[in-house]
Image (cartoon, grey):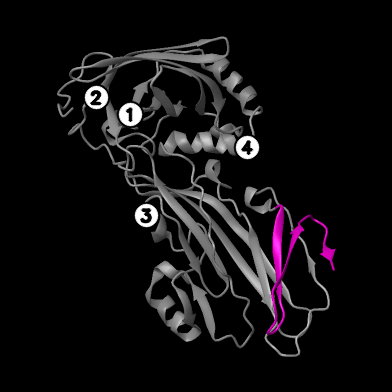
Amino acid sequence: MTNNVKSLQPNEVFVADFEKNSMRAINDTKGLRYTAKNLSVSFKNGLLEATFTLRASNEEAEIHLKVLPIIESVTTEKEQVLLGREVNLTEGFKLVSYRIELNAQSLTLMPINLHLKGKHVLALGLEKTFTKELYYCQFELPLLPLKDIFDEGRINHSKFPCRELHDLSFRSITLSEPFESYFEGEIPIMEETAETIFTEDGEMDMLEFLELLEKDSSLGSLSPKGIVHANVPDSIFKSGTFGEWRHVNNATNVYSYITYRYGGTDNRITYIAYMEYANQSSGSPHQIQLTVKKNVGVYYNVTDGTLALYSTYKDRVFIKNLKLTLKSTAASGIFTSRKYWNVGSSSLLGRVAAAAIIWVPYAGSAVETLQTLSGDSSEE
């Protein structure tokens, strides 16, 4: 189907359609082939029900949808956003995104819908299960008993695990499945006389790294400014590829981040975990310490140039299968005991249940133990 929509009828909105991995900003109506019309929304028996017609030049589909309302966050300032968990939907479609904003902003509005700023807006993303084509539209919400709906949403929020709520929120803004990726790399434990380090591009001479650091801001910034940390340049949040992990590993810190676009816009949301590590490798005992300093979401709004932390989207990056390695570099080196523990935090990233501790004697075979971590230290 190639016919473009020329004009809208009353109670009709434009629908953006995306093929898999072809998300783009909808800046105008060029190339748009679908509309949605005659939206009706009601609240019955604890469920939000919506019906509307998905329309193209030569076909129409009646969409019937029921969702369980769930507020996005229990904090007062974020109770302006409501998510929906699918209960029932017209056969042949899958719900990808359901989001109600009581004060819609340019961050989440497609450029063609900026006239809806400040209004109550319902954003819907549906996938056609046979073709995998994604349809996304934003309606001005009709009058509803919002207090009753949000009260129900607060109750429902407490019924689901945090990870599921995070995933629901993620889909509502990115129109994609939550990321699952791993950073499988080494963090070197360096002595004071260390001559090499590891970057995301491999092993590098220390002096070479320091020279490169002055030239290439992508490896870190020495500026005291920075929305996340002085060692993380703000430029990484404003440009770069979408949907790909980036890992930066230098002499004292590591940060990993991934960026997605807000559905139908060029606005960006980046999830980043910033970690610092330290070791005492001269004398005895030897100590390795890995600390998660930041685990946050950062959004960049290209419409007004705003760069800010987004508290609703913090704690989204998880560490799995953490491994710390301590290696003897002297022929006479010997391990006499070992002690390890986890300092917990409220951060999801801090909830590491277990870690593999690897002991590598000089010119010997590695010995690995899997230790369950707790707030108390363990010693062998």
**In the image, farthest residue toward the bottom:** 331
Earlier in the chain: of badge 1 and badge 4, it is 1
> Is 373 one of the magenta-colored residues?
yes
Left or right of 223: which side holds 110?
left
Residue density around tag 3, few if under 14, some if 14–19, many if 20 or more, within 10 Å: some
Can you give x and y, in whole percent of width and height, for residue 113 in the image? 29, 30
Q: Are marks 4 and 3 in contact (CB under 8 Å)?
A: no
Spatial CA distance of label 1 from label 4 is: 27 Å
Q: Are marks 3 and 1 in contact (CB under 8 Å)?
A: no
**Quadrant housing the N terminus:** top left
Vertical position of residue 197 compared to residue 86: above or below: below
Amino acid under disc 2:
Tyr
Spatial CA distance of label 2 from label 1 is: 8 Å
Rendered image: mark on residue 162 = 4
Residue density around tag 2, few if under 14, some if 14–19, many if 20 or more, within 10 Å: many
**Mark 4, mark 3: which one is toward the viewer?**
4
- Check disc 3 and report its element: helix, strand or loop: loop
Q: Are marks 2 and 1 in contact (CB under 8 Å)?
A: yes
User: Dot 3 corresponds to which residue?
Assistant: 238
Q: Residue at x 45, y 56 (%)?
A: 245
